[in-house]
Amino acid sequence: QVQLLESGGGWVQAGGSLRLSCRPSRNTFSIIVMSWYRQVPGNQRELVAAFNNIDGSTNYTDSVKGRFRVSRNNARDTVYLQMNSLVPEDTAIYYCKFRSRNNHDYWGQGTQVTVSS
């Protein structure tokens, strides 16, 4: 079974930076969209950023525009989320999600990001 492997979470002071990465345990599917979501306990999971693996386009939720950047590697099988100018409101569990060409979604296990004021 394919798993998504996340890394890069942790603790940082406000104004700091972190970079998350996510890759599949093995490549057995065509990835068309690579996304990052986040969730605070008690709240719904929200889309933070997405990378379209077909045309290279990206989109971001308003609260992270200008601070976060989503990118991929040359092999198109790893997605990164560069998070700059972090604020306490960015504290959450971050999940990556890959959508395959047959519209199946794969989720990562989640990585905690904590931003202290």
Image (cartoon, rainbow, N blue to C red):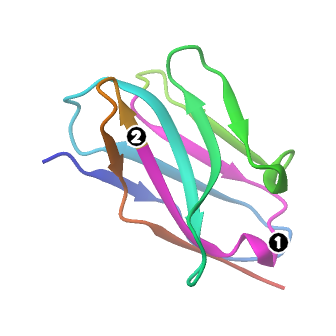
Look at the numbered discs 1 and 2 and tell me whether their residues touch, using CB distance below 8 Å: no
Identify the residue at horizontal 73%, vertical 43% (top origin): 60
Hey, what amino acid is under mark 2?
Answer: Phe
**Which residue in the protein does label 2 denote?**
98
Q: Residues within 10 Å of mark 1 (few under 14, many from 20)?
A: some
Q: Which residue, as the protein is rendered here, is positioned at the far left? A: 1
Identify the residue at horizontal 61%, vertical 74% (top origin): 92
- Element at badge 2? strand
Task: Locate residue 52: give its quadrant.
Answer: top right
**Which residue in the protein does label 1 denote?**
87
As measured in the structure, the alpha-carbon distance from the residue carrying label 1 to the one carrying label 2 is: 26 Å
Task: Give the quadrant of the C terminus.
Answer: bottom right
Q: Where's residue 25, x and y in %?
A: 23, 45
Q: On the picture, is 10 further left or further right than 85?
A: left
Q: Considering only order in the chain, which callout, 2 or 1, is on the residue closer to the N terminus?
A: 1
In magenta segment, residue 48: no
Identify the residue at horizontal 87%, vertical 45% (top origin): 66
Where is 64 relative to 91, above or below? above
Judged by depth in the image, the label closer to the viewer, 1 or 2, is 2
Q: Where's residue 48, x and y in %?
A: 66, 52
Q: Give the range drawn in magenta.
A: 77-97
Task: Locate residue 91: give its quadrant.
Answer: bottom right
Q: On the picture, is 94 further left or further right than 11?
A: left
Where is 13 relative to 64, above or below? below
Identify the residue at horizontal 24%, vertical 27% (top origin): 29
Q: Where's residue 58, x and y in %?
A: 67, 30
Q: How crowded is mark 2: few (under 14 residues within 10 Å), some or many (20 or more)?
A: many
- Element at badge 1? loop
Hey, what amino acid is under mark 1?
Answer: Val
Q: Which of 63 and 115 is in front in this view?
A: 63
